[in-house]
Image (cartoon, grey):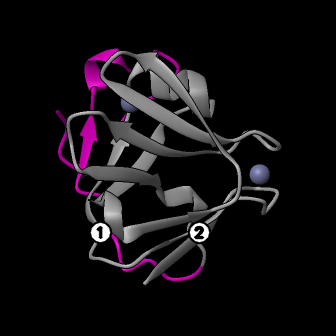
Amino acid sequence: MLKGSCLCGEVTFEVNAPADGASVCHCGQCRKQSGHVWSSAHAAETAIHIAGPVHWFEASPAAKRGFCARCGSFLFWKAHDEDTMSFALGALDGETGLKLEKHIFTADKGDYYEIDDEVPQS
Ligand SMILES: [Zn+2]
Ligand SMILES: [Zn+2]
């Protein structure tokens, strides 16, 4: 099981299912919300148990973004037409057993950094 929390600790979550698709998102929305890029994996929405006050923001009609209203940690991303939910890898505590599989939305990346690892890009 994976466990995570926001920076202030008011929001905690557990993932009671295998996590998949560990990725780094370079899209403009993730960069704005996180301050840089956003790393996440996903699991069945029903397997992610959240405690605490998550606020949801819809940056587009297709998905909502969950964050802690107290400290601002960007924790969750959920597409309305999918039954999975993404959670922030940076919010996890302890060993994750996960490994990044891909960079996504690299066409939208900022010009102030290079992607220079061996992780596949799309
Ligand atoms: Zn918080
Ligand atoms: Zn993104």
Main SS category, magenta section: loop
Q: Label 1 sits on what residue type?
A: Ala
Q: Position of residue 108 (x, y in %)?
A: 34, 16
**Front-most of residues 122 and 8:** 8
Residue named by callout 1 = 19
Residue 94 seen from this side: yes
Q: Is residue 87 left or right of residue 34?
A: left
The answer to whether marks 2 and 1 mark residues whose Cβ atoms lie closer than 8 Å is no
Q: How crowded is the residue under tag 1: few (<14 C-alpha within 10 Å), some, or many (20+)? A: many
Q: Position of residue 111 (x, y in %)?
A: 46, 15
Hey, which quadrant is residue 78 in on the image?
A: top left
Label 2 vs label 1: CA separation? 13 Å
Q: Is residue 28 above or below residue 17?
A: above
Q: Is residue 28 left or right of residue 115?
A: right
Q: Is residue 92 above or below residue 45?
A: below
Q: Is residue 114 left or right of residue 68?
A: left
Q: Which residues are magenta?
A: 94-122
Disc number for residue 4: 2
SS for callout 1: loop
Q: Is residue 13 magenta?
A: no
